[in-house]
Amino acid sequence: MTDSTQNTPNTDLAAAAADNKAWSGRFSEPVSELVKRYTASVFFDQRMAEQDIRGSLAHAAMLAKQGIITPQDLADIQRGMAQILGEIRADSFVWSLDAEDVHLNIERRLTTLVGDAGKRLHTGRSRNDQVATDIRLWLRDAIDQILILIGDFQRSILTLAEAHAATPMPGHTHLQVAQPVTFGHHLMAYFEMTLRDAERFRDVRQRTNRLPLGAAALAGTSFPIDREYVARELGFEGVCENSLDAVSDRDFAIEFCAAVAITMTHLSRLSEELILWMSPRFGFIDLADRFCTGSSIMPQKKNPDVPELVRGKTGRVNGHLVALLTLMKGQPLAYNKDNQEDKEPLFDAADTLIDTLRIYADMILGIRVKADAMRAALAQGFATATDLADYLVKKGLPFRDAHEAVALAVRAAEMRGCDLADFTLDELRAAMCHVSGAGERLAGDIASVLTIEGSLAARDHIGGTAPAQVRAAIARARQRLA
Ligand code: ARG
């Protein structure tokens, strides 16, 4: 409404507004259309409708059990809610901006359907504890879904890692070739990361899974409620112990967004690697066509759009975490309308991770590994230099001397444009001649040390890249997943 409404007598306005608003008897004029849209949340919080109904049914059952409403009221509420649920699922429920949010939309429809019983539902309850309950129920469902999807992602990683437990590739530090690792070993790093991610989500779930209902607006209620009963009905592990805290804090949402941001960060790192590996400069892998797109101008292009978007969307999810932290930092106790802003970041963070995990589980299985290119890259970076130094140390040379001797050998190889393994024993000795005690420690057994397979096999301990260890790690991982 616009300013023209100011001409209408206040009493009419109050009566008209009372038709629409739960609190309007107190007000002498309705809010403007702009303010109505500005303050409404119905267009994004309606996705908590099923949780809202679940919460209301548990609350109503408790009110009836405690003799606060009659069994007939409860039956009416249950009948009305069943119909509303059907309408929402059939997409025939009419959401109204006038009713502001999901809670008032459902309550209003209930009252239309069942009359006074609908008006009694809100006894001993406030939207403040109602919304806090709905979000927790919603988040619990989202976490359960995320945990299943992390498992799917991990199973895909294990399948590819198993196939490449012994496939050598250059391991990098500073994006320079460092030492040989197997592709399977590299992939298993992401298994470990996401295992911790899953742990984090389970942890968040525990703290999320507490019941705010009963806190009412902020101080509790004068009705003889049974909060433990409602908690059990809704599958909560307990009740929030302080009513002010119950309605006002959103730390569980912040924690959730942090867990999402960390998981997305892991997936973003993997994405960055897939993008690099798919570049012809690396040429280590090819992604299945269904995850790539072409260019509208360059006919030859096949771009890794999906991993690029994962990397990009990680920024947006990190933003949601910061948004929620910032949302909370200045709020005095207890509930403030600021809290309504918690939902969109939360929903989008969950949606983004859920879609990303779904896509990733499939994308991993569509990776074609170019093992020859990985091996060729290894031949270029003196990846077995550390093995040569370790060899000299095992023959009694102090490590710092061995390091220097091998550095000289690498320099000589670089000048000649060959690999360390291409030197004869005498050439290698000559290259190290400035480090006393180095050359004479070299013997014929050096050849196997300088091979990639020798280097891999030597790292034969828990957490090492020896193919046998990678296979053992995969076997343990399958146990940990089961
Ligand atoms: N839509 C509101 C929210 O999301 C519900 C709670 C509103 N409570 C209030 N007293 N205005 O937070």
Image (cartoon, helix red, strand yellow):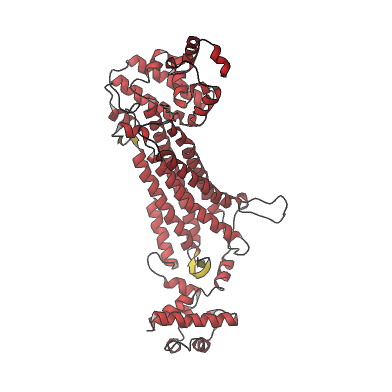
| Among the 4 quarters of the image, the one containing residue 247 | top left
Report the residue at 44% width, 71% height from top. Answer: 457
Ligand 1 found in image quarter: top left
* 121 relative position to 292: left or right: left
Q: Position of residue 20 (x, y in %)?
A: 48, 17
Q: Position of residue 367 (x, y in %)?
A: 56, 56
Spot the residue most to the left: 224
Q: Looking at this view, is 240 or 232 the one in front?
A: 240
Report the residue at 59% width, 64% height from top. Answer: 282
Q: Looking at this view, is 307 or 168 the one in front?
A: 307
Figure check: 284 above or below 80: below
Q: Count the labels in the image.
A: 0
| Among the 4 quarters of the image, the one containing residue 129 | top left
Q: Position of residue 403 (x, y in %)?
A: 44, 79
Figure check: 306 above or below 136: below
For residue 413, say whether it is visible. yes
* 372 relative position to 434: left or right: right
Q: Quadrant of the N terminus?
A: top right
Report the residue at 44% width, 39% height from top. Answer: 327
For residue 235, say whether it is visible. no
Q: Looking at this view, is 172 or 50 the one in front?
A: 172
* 227 relative position to 267: left or right: left
Q: Position of residue 382 (x, y in %)?
A: 52, 75
